[in-house]
Image (spheres, grey):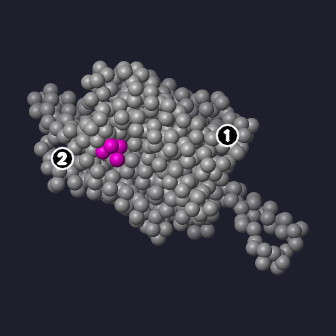
Amino acid sequence: MRQNRWFALAILATGMLMVILDGSIVTVAMPVMQRDLGFTPEGLTWVINAYLIAFGSLLLLAGRLGDLLGRKRVLIAGTGVFIAASVLAGLAAGPATLIAARFLQGAGSAMFSAVSLGILVTLFPDQRERARAIGVFSFTGAAGASLGQVLGGVLTDALSWHWIFLVNVPIGVATLALAVPYLPADPGLGLRAGADALGALLVTAGLMTGIYAVVQTSGSRLLTAGAAAALLAGFVLRQATAKTPLMPLRVLRSRQVSGANALQILMVGAMFSFQILMALYMQRVLHYTALRTGLAMLPAALAIATVSLGVSARLIHRFGERAVLIAGLVLLTGALGWLTRLPADARYATDLLPVMLLIAGGGLALPAITGLGMSGARPDDAGLASGLFNTTQQLGMAIGVAALSTVAATRTTGRLNAGAAEAVALTDGYRLAFTIGAALLALSIAGAVFVLRPAPAGVRQEPPTALPEPAPASHRRKSASPQQQQPARAAARRELDSAPQE
C-alpha cells in the first residue's frame, strides 16, 4: 500500500509536469510559429493567452466537479481532453486551429490540475510524508516551466515546432494507462450534493472575462474589467445565499488558506514573468537561438529540482512552512533584484548564471505555499481547495505576464522614440519589468511575515470538521460508558465547530 501511494504520486507528478510544460514550452518556439502560420504580432500572444484563459477560468468548476463526481473520473477525463487537443495543436495548419487547440488544452489541464492536489492530500495524511509528497509535486510546477523552455528549444531546432505539442501524446497516454488502475477511486458526493449551475456560470464567465481584460490591448479594457468585477461580485453573493454553493465561503475563513492564495498570485506572477521575459531578452537582445535559450535556462531547473526534492521537505518539517516560504521568497527577490542592473551586452557567467542559481528559492517557496494553501481544507472540500489554489496560480501567471510584458513594451517604445538603440531600449524595458517583479516578491515577504503569522497559543488550527481520534482498543475498557460519553462528544463537536480558524 505504501509503495502504491508513492507510485500514484509519480503518476500525478508526471501528468502535472506535462501540464506545466505546455504552459511554457511554446515560448521559445513562438517566432518560428509566427513565420510558418502567418500570425500577426498581436495574434501570436494568443498562443499563450488562450491556454491561460481556459486553464485559469475553469479550475474552480473542475475542482468542485471532482468533489461531486469523483476526482479520479475528472482527472482521467481531463487527461483525455488534453491528449486530443495536443494532437489538434500539433497538426494545426493555421492560427485559428492552433488557438482553438490551445484553449482545449487549457480546459484539459484545468480538469487534471484541479483535482490532483485533492488526491495527493488524501493519499498522504501523515504530515511529514505529505510535506515530502508536496515537495515532489511542487517540483513539477517549479521546474516545469524551465524544463519546458529547454525541451521547446531542443524540439524546435532538432525537429519542428509541431513536436512541442505531439510529444504530449505518448506522455499523456502513459499517464492515462497508469492512472486507471493505480490512482485511488472515490465515488464523489454526487451531483445532488451541490452542483450550483448558476454559481459555476458566474465564476467561469467572471474569471474568463477578467483574464481577457488583462491580456487584451484595446481601449475597451476598463469596460471588460468592469463586467468581470460584476460577474465575480454576483458569484460571491450567490455563494453566500445558495443552499449548495459551488465554493462554500467557509474555505476562505482560514487566514492561512486565503493568505497563501493571495500571496501566490504575487509570487507566481513575478516568477512566471521572469521565465517569459528572460527568454525574450536572450533571443531579442543577445540573439540566442531557441536551443541555446533553453539550455541557458537549464541551471534554474536543476537548482529548483535540487532544493525542492532534496531539501524542502526536511526544512518544512523542522522550521515550518511559513519560515521556509519566507526564505524562498528572499532568494527569489534577490534573483530579480540582480536583474535590475541587467546590461544590453550581458555575459552569461557573471550576469545571468547567478540569477539562475538564486531561482532555487522557488524550490523552497512553492512547496511551502502549497502546504499552506491546502492546510485548512475539509476532507470533502479537498478538490475545491485544490481548484482554488490552482486558480490563483493561473491567475498570477496570466496577470503577471500581461502586466509586466505591457510595462516592458511601453518603456521600450518610449526609449525607441527618444532615439535609443533597439538593444538598449529592449533591455531598459525588461529591467523595469524585473524591478516591478522584485517589488511584488518583497510585498509577498511582508505578507508572509504579517498575514501568515502563527496562530496565538491556545487557538485550534484543525480543519473545521476534524473530530478527535477514537481511543485505542486497549483504553476503551477504562473509558466512560457510551451514555456518559455522549455529552462530552457533543461538547467537543460544538467546540470544534465554533473554534476560530487561523
Split into 4 quadrants, where in the image is the N terminus? Answer: bottom right
In the rendered image, residue 241, in percent from the top left (x then y), is placed at: 68, 36
Which one is nearer the viewer's eye here, 182 or 111?
Answer: 182
Find residue 427 and report its image quarter.
Answer: top left
Residue 406 lies, with reference to residue 129, above or below; the image says above
Q: Amino acid at mark 1?
A: Leu
Q: Nearer the viewer, mark 2 or mark 1?
A: 1
Q: Are marks 2 and 1 in contact (CB under 8 Å)?
A: no
Residue tagged by mark 1?
Answer: 69
Q: Is residue 210 above or below residue 297?
A: above
Classify mark 2: residues with Cα within 10 Å, few (<14), some (14-19) or many (20+): some
Where is residue 455 drawn, in percent x and y?
A: 55, 63
Write the residue at 32% across / 26% down: 44
Picture residue at 52% right of the left edge, 30% below the top: 206
Question: Is 4 part of what is drawn in magenta?
Answer: no
Residue lying at 68% horizontally and 35% vertically, measured from the top left: 195
Residue identified by numbered label 2: 342
**Region rendered in magenta:** 147-151
User: How far across and down, in percent of the image, does residue 22 sit?
Assistant: 40, 39
